[in-house]
Amino acid sequence: MTDRFATVRERMVQEQLLRRGITDSRTLQAMAEVPRHLFVDDAMQASSYGDHPLPIAGDQTISQPYIVAAMTQALQLLGDEKVLEIGTGSGYQAAVLSRLCTKVYTVERINTLLAGARRIFDQLHYYNILSRLDDGTLGWAEYAPYDAIIVTAGGPGIPDSLVEQLADPGRLVIPVGGRDVQELQLLTKEDGEIHIQRLESVRFVSLIGEQGWNG
């Protein structure tokens, strides 16, 4: 079946990603491949590749393409990793990750979002994504440690549970700050030492949970 959005996706990669410094070829390929328009309501499909976030159910959002690519690139995935995602949301970020690693474990606290994302994963045959309804700030200890962890909501700090579940060596990317504006941080763990690199200012929905915001 013809993909009527293929050209739009390629334009997105060229104009929104490459021009802003997304250079990892695997990340660019995944962004060009995953059908972002399937992860939004039908009424918003025409604008699904625009340079902006879009609203989804549960007062949540699907991040703008550049932010998805920037967070993905920061993980430096090579293909054989096990990745934990906190905040499934629409499912788009997990779908992109699934093209770049062996398995994605994604945790979401809103059942309707998780169910919707799961339907799209199955539709696309992205069967290397495992999902769970739970408090994402506690991670998913059963399958730890993870080579990489990505958090798609902004919290007041980096949850200790996620740092503990990160492999050594490992990389964790998360927005940290207030409710309105956060700083995208990259935490690396190597030889038992933790290092944090500040990447850029971002704006995400709140990370709700025991080790995040109260609600």
Image (cartoon, grey):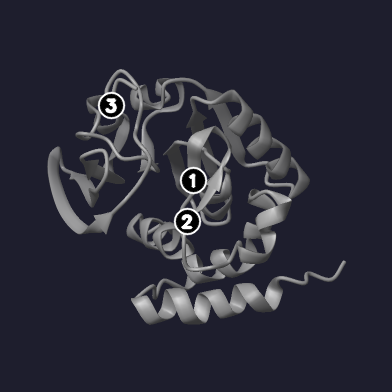
Say which amino acid is labelled 3.
Gly
* Front-lying residue, 87 or 201: 201
| Image quarter hosting the N terminus | bottom right
Q: Amino acid at mark 1?
A: Thr
Circle 1 sits in a helix, a strand or a loop, which is it?
Answer: strand
Q: Nearer the viewer, mark 3 or mark 1?
A: 1
Q: Residue at x 71, y 44 (%)?
A: 120
Residue placed under numbered mark 1 in the picture: 61
Residue located at (74% from left, 41% from top): 122
Q: Is residue 62 visible?
A: yes
State the SS at label 3.
Answer: loop
Q: Quadrant of residue 128?
A: top right
Dot 1 or dot 2: first in sequence order is: 2
Is the Cβ of the residue at disc 3 closer than 8 Å to that at disc 1? no
Q: Which residue is the site of mark 2?
A: 53
Residue 97, given in percent of the width and then of the height, sits at 51, 52
Q: Secondary structure at mark 2?
A: loop
Residues at badges 1 and 2 in contact (C-beta under 8 Å)?
Answer: yes
**CB atoms of marks 3 and 2 within 8 Å:** no
Marks 3 and 2, the one that precedes in the sequence: 2
Disc 3: which residue: 212
Residue 206, horizontal then vertical, whole percent: 34, 35
Q: Amino acid at mark 2?
A: Pro
Distance between mark 3 and mark 1 Cα atoms = 18 Å
At 49% across and 36% down in the image, what residue appears? Answer: 59
Q: Quadrant of residue 200?
A: bottom left
* Real-space Cα separation, disc 3 to disc 2, in angstroms: 22 Å
